[in-house]
Image: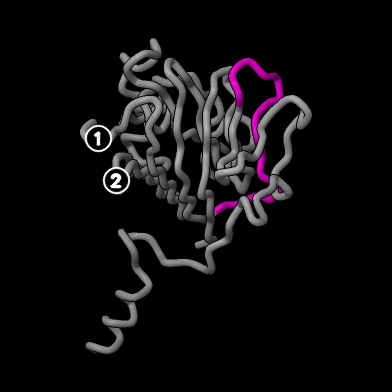
Amino acid sequence: MKKRIMISTLFLVGGVLAGGEWRNLLEGGNLDQWWQKNPSAGWVMEADGSVHLPAGVKGGSLSSRESFLDFELQFEWKISEGGNSGVYYRAKGQSPEYQILDDEKHVRGQWPVSRAAALYDLFGRSDDSCYKPAGEWNTGKIVAKGNRLQHWLNGVKVVDVEVDSPEWKEAFAKSKFKNPETFGKMKGKIWFQDHGGEVWYRNIRIREL
């Protein structure tokens, strides 16, 4: 019995099943694993290994070529003063978003459901002390396993919710979203949002669960 318990524990990390090998989504220092509508005027790879969206460009959001359902995604992000971006996942129509925001200078920072690391328009982050302001690097993590969605910010779990739970249904009914049958339940792309402001991402890696 003890051996069985020990083996089971090895496959549990923070309440979700551990998964496969990590994959670097910026392998080779390029964007070969990504798609953008206008690559000549959009996201660029910088010499430091970060992917950068300059202010005012019209490249569109950066989409993974591959779709994912159950996964752990880790990344670092830095937003410009007054900036707004986001990381969409299971993206197929209206989809969950890990909000990226300058909480202090952007107007949306006044609402918990649109602050950095929130599950946008649904659940605000549970801890404000872990947020680093515009111009500083933050570490983000998204865990999606079955109906369970988690957002992490700088090592702190700030959102932990079950799709279709009573609290989910209550929050969804108050949100702008209109597709409860599919929202957060479908295999889909990962998108780094172009919202018109300057933003950087780096050390983007994923493993399937």
Question: Which element is circle 1 on?
Answer: loop
Q: Main secondary structure of the magenta part?
A: loop
Residue 39 pos. (x, y %): 76, 32
Q: How many marks?
A: 2
**Marks 2 and 1 in Cβ contact (< 8 Å):** yes
Q: CA distance from mark 2 to mark 1?
A: 8 Å
Q: Amino acid at mark 1?
A: Ser
Residue 63 forms part of the magenta stretch: yes
Residue 145 pos. (x, y %): 46, 55
Question: What numbered label is drawn on residue 157?
Answer: 2
Residue 85 pos. (x, y %): 51, 26
Q: Which residues are magenta?
A: 54-69
Q: Amino acid at mark 2?
A: Lys
Residue 103 forms part of the magenta stretch: no
Q: Which residue is mark 1?
A: 126
The one nearer the camera, 81 or 100, is 81
In the current view of this chain or complex, which residue is farthest to the top?
107
